[in-house]
Image (tube, rainbow, N blue to C red):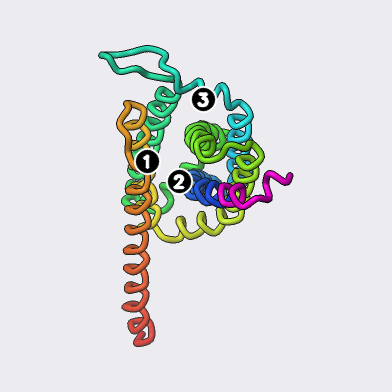
Amino acid sequence: MEALLNSEALVALLSLTAMEIVLGIDNIVFIAILVGKLPKQEQAKARSIGIALALLTRLALLFSISWVMGLTEPLFSVFSRSFSGRDLILLAGGLFLIAKSTYEIHDRLEAATHGPDALRLKKAAFLKILIQIAILDVVFSLDSVITAVGMAQQLAIMVIAMVVAVAVMLFASGAISDFVHRHPTIKILALSFLLLIGVMLFAEGTGAHVDKGYIYFAMFFSLAVELLNMRLRRSAAAPNRAGG
């Protein structure tokens, strides 16, 4: 316990918790978009289960550190490029995220074209949604655990950081989900960035390093611009409502 109370351990804990929260943003957005296809009364339950699965996956991988780190060992080579277990998971997860994001964008645009009833008629099965969430939880959790192992040496610090980060995800998931679904342009923007993250995961699986800072900066910059646009649209609509 005393090892967790020194300044170095506290700095590591705060830094890792902040990093885990940032890494969990895309996980929250993905869950929010998927559960939005469920009936309203089932969405909160699906979000909670999906985030709980994310925590369980992270902890399971964390307590299997030797296995996780072994995933970085080369399994085979193709054209002098070595591929590890981690690479294969990133490749598969990246392709899944690219395909799913593309489908959701197409589905959203088609629903907008053919009317709101088209989207309501496509209610997804609860179990099917959870399976899709679980698949991406593995990919996001792998990245999260490898980051944790690289940033901290004490298992207790990693566990506490992950539990706190997932608690923040659970607390914020409802508000984020409602905000995304209230604003169609934000939903398309979120799907676009999930598509971008899928490309990044696939690129990392092929051995190309992509600095996540650039992607998160682009994400927050685009979100800030869209929030300004939304505020301008509300300001322009207010005089019209007052005049009407």
Percent position of residue 179, x then y: 48, 60
Question: Does the image show residue 44?
Answer: no
Sequence-first tag of 2 and 3: 2
* Circles 1 and 3: CB atoms closer than 8 Å: no
Element carrying mark 3: helix
Which residue of the protein is positioned furthest toward the left in this rendering?
Answer: 79
Percent position of residue 140, x then y: 48, 37
Sequence-first tag of 1 and 2: 2
**Relative to 154, 237 lies left or right:** left
The residue where tag 2 is placed is 26
Q: What residue type is labelled 2?
A: Asp
Q: Which residue is drawn at 36% across and 47% down?
A: 193
Question: Does the image show residue 112?
Answer: yes
Q: Pick the residue in front: 230 or 241.
A: 230
The residue where tag 3 is placed is 69
The residue where tag 1 is placed is 197
Q: In which quadrant of the rendered image does the N terminus lie?
A: top right
Q: Report, in whole angstroms, how far the alpha carbon at label 1 lies from the one at label 2.
A: 8 Å
Q: Report, in whole angstroms, how far the alpha carbon at label 2 lies from the one at label 3.
A: 23 Å
Percent position of residue 99, x then y: 36, 34
* Circles 1 and 2: CB atoms closer than 8 Å: yes
Q: Residue at x 45, y 23 (%)?
A: 72
Q: What residue type is labelled 1?
A: Ile
Near mark 3 (Cα within 10 A), the count class, few <14, some 14-19 or many ≥20, is: some
Please state the extent of the stretch shown in magenta in the rendering. Answer: 1-12
Element carrying mark 1: helix
Q: Report, in whole angstroms, how far the alpha carbon at label 1 lies from the one at label 3.
A: 22 Å
Q: Is residue 136 above or below residue 232?
A: above
Q: Which residue is drawn at 62% across and 37% down?
A: 154
Prevalent SS, magenta region:
helix
Q: What residue type is labelled 3?
A: Met
**Residue 62 position by quadrant:** top right
